[in-house]
């Protein structure tokens, strides 16, 4: 979340950023935050003054009694009683103001970086660069759901029977292709200096709030109500929360961590051709890369992360493009985001396979994730993450772009992981 200092010292810039993100009622919300904060500070000052007077009177009472000034001692005791009662009311009011302020701050999205373009939606995103070669498929090329059925790679119908739509079952070489991609992505991340971890697939409410998934995406997360736990929408959530309430030493930065996990998303309201086959699932596999960095280095880290993901799709031989998202198409928590899309030759459309974002201090402020300099000063870290990569649409593009009359070619980089070079 934004800090009070950001809001009060840079109000005009914050409002300009929220306007770029198309946040409704920005002026009213920021004005209310400033007003509630002033109220909170006033209550805190009154409470501090009251407690200071209690302490002073408590010391004086002893001296009054020692000097035989009993009437003054009794008057002081009566005043202390009044102050303590008043302090209780002030403490309750302070708690209410703090809770109101926290709720307001949770509702405000991150302010976009100055490099984020103006725009309302996907049509306003900016293409940074493209790469890869056109697959050159014939007009009758099959989409991946038909290829999966033809070669016995994925059973969508059995998944529906067992769990519902959006939960496919991978079979034979389809399952081996999944495992190959996971291992390939993890090895590439490890070779790039990321520490591999295996996180839990459920998180508590505090973890959801820490990364900004709550309350913003509460309706998109699967919730185990009895235990008040949430199935993770991405490994970003448990991995980043490792550093909640942690002070890192400056020499430890940047922290570079990667993790494979299954991901779970309700995707409420999704329908139509865009969700067919592997295009949009409720459960899917993904390798995530996460960095914790100091502010002055975080944008260098972001560039390295984008280059890493670009290298993965290039090694898989897929046509791709990298987009800089406009303000209206960015997530609630992001300060800047680059999407990587691969081209589906059979569907004749671009498929998003990765989002790489710098959240600056927005998540770190929620997480209380800080770093300490050599001079013993502390500050908020910057957090970053990216998909490296999400499997479903990668698999879709691999199947479609590599189809031939003799079968589906496996990219050379994947052959050692698959144990086969063709699906036929």
Image: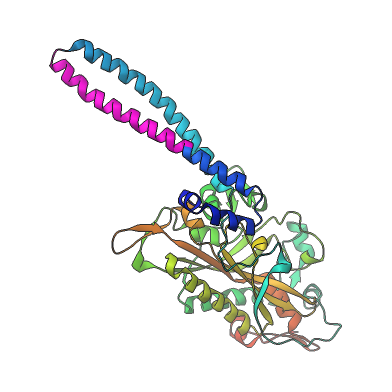
Up the image or down, 195 lies above or below 135; here it is: above
Q: Can you give x and y, in whole percent of width and height, for residue 320 in the image? A: 67, 80
* Rendered view: 99 above or below 334: above
- Going 42% across and 30% down the picture, which residue do you hit? 91
Q: Is residue 241 left or right of residue 20?
A: left
Front-most of residues 274 and 235: 274
Q: Is residue 270 above or below residue 98?
A: below
Q: How many marks?
A: 0
Residue at 73%, 56% in the rendered image? 163
Q: In screen coordinates, is 310 left or right of 239?
A: right
- Across and down, in percent, residue 299 comes to 49, 70
Tell whether position 66 is magenta: yes
Q: Residue furthest front?
A: 12
Span colored in magenta: 39-68
Prevailing secondary structure of the magenta residues: helix
Within the image, what quadrant is residue 233 found in?
Answer: bottom right
Can I make out residue 384 in this image?
yes
| Outermost residue toward the right in this view | 140
* Rendering quarter of residue 348: bottom right
Q: Position of residue 71 (x, y in %)?
A: 22, 10
Considering every residue shown, the one lying at the far top of the view is 71
Q: Quadrant of the C terminus?
A: bottom right
How was this image coloured?
A: rainbow
Question: Can residue 212 be seen at all in this image of the molecule?
Answer: no
Of 314 and 57, the residue lying toward us: 57
Q: Is residue 396 left or right of residue 207?
A: right
Residue 252 pos. (x, y %) = 37, 67
In the displayed structure, does residue 379 sit left or right of residue 55?
right
In reply to whether residue 308 is colored magenta, the answer given is no
User: Is 131 or 165 nearer to us in this picture?
Assistant: 131
């Amino acid at each position: 979340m934004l800090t009070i200092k950001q809001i009060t010292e840079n109000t005009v810039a914050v409002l300009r950023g929220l306007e770029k993100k198309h946040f409704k009622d920005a002026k009213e919300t920021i004005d209310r935050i400033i007003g509630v904060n002033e109220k909170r500070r006033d209550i805190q000052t009154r409470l501090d003054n009251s407690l200071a007077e209690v302490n002073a009177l408590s010391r004086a009472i002893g001296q009054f009694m020692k000097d035989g000034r009993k009437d003054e001692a009794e008057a002081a005791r009566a005043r202390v009683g009044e102050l303590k009662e008043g302090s209780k009311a002030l403490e309750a009011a302070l708690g209410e103001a703090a809770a109101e302020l926290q709720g307001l701050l949770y509702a405000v999205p991150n302010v976009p970086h100055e490099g984020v373009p103006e725009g309302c939606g996907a049509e306003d995103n900016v293409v940074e660069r493209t790469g890869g070669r056109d697959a050159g498929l014939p007009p009758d090329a099959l989409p991946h759901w038909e290829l999966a059925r033809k070669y016995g790679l994925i059973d969508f119908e059995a998944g529906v029977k067992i769990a519902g739509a959006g939960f496919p079952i991978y079979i034979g070489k389809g399952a081996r292709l999944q495992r190959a991609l996971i291992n390939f992505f993890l090895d590439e991340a490890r070779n790039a200096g990321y520490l591999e971890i295996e996180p839990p697939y459920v998180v508590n409410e505090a973890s959801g709030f820490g990364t900004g998934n709550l309350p913003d995406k509460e309706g998109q997360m699967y919730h185990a109500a009895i235990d008040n736990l949430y199935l993770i929408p991405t490994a970003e959530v448990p991995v980043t929360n490792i550093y909640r309430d942690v002070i890192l030493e400056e020499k430890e930065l940047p922290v570079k961590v990667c993790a494979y996990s299954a991901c779970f998303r309700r995707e409420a309201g999704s329908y139509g051709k865009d969700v067919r086959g592997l295009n949009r699932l409720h459960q899917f596999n993904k390798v995530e890369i996460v960095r914790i960095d100091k502010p002055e280095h975080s944008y260098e880290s972001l560039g390295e992360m984008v280059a890493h993901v670009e290298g993965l799709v290039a090694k898989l031989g897929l046509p791709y493009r990298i987009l800089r998202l406009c303000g209206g198409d960015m997530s609630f928590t992001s300060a800047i985001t680059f999407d990587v899309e691969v081209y589906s030759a059979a569907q004749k459309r671009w498929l998003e396979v990765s989002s790489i974002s710098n959240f600056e201090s927005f998540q770190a402020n929620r997480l209380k994730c800080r770093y300490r300099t050599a001079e013993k000063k502390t500050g908020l870290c910057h957090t970053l993450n990216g998909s490296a990569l999400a499997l479903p649409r990668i698999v879709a593009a691999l199947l479609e772009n590599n189809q031939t009359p003799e079968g589906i070619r496996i990219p050379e980089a994947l052959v050692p992981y698959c144990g086969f070079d063709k699906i036929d």
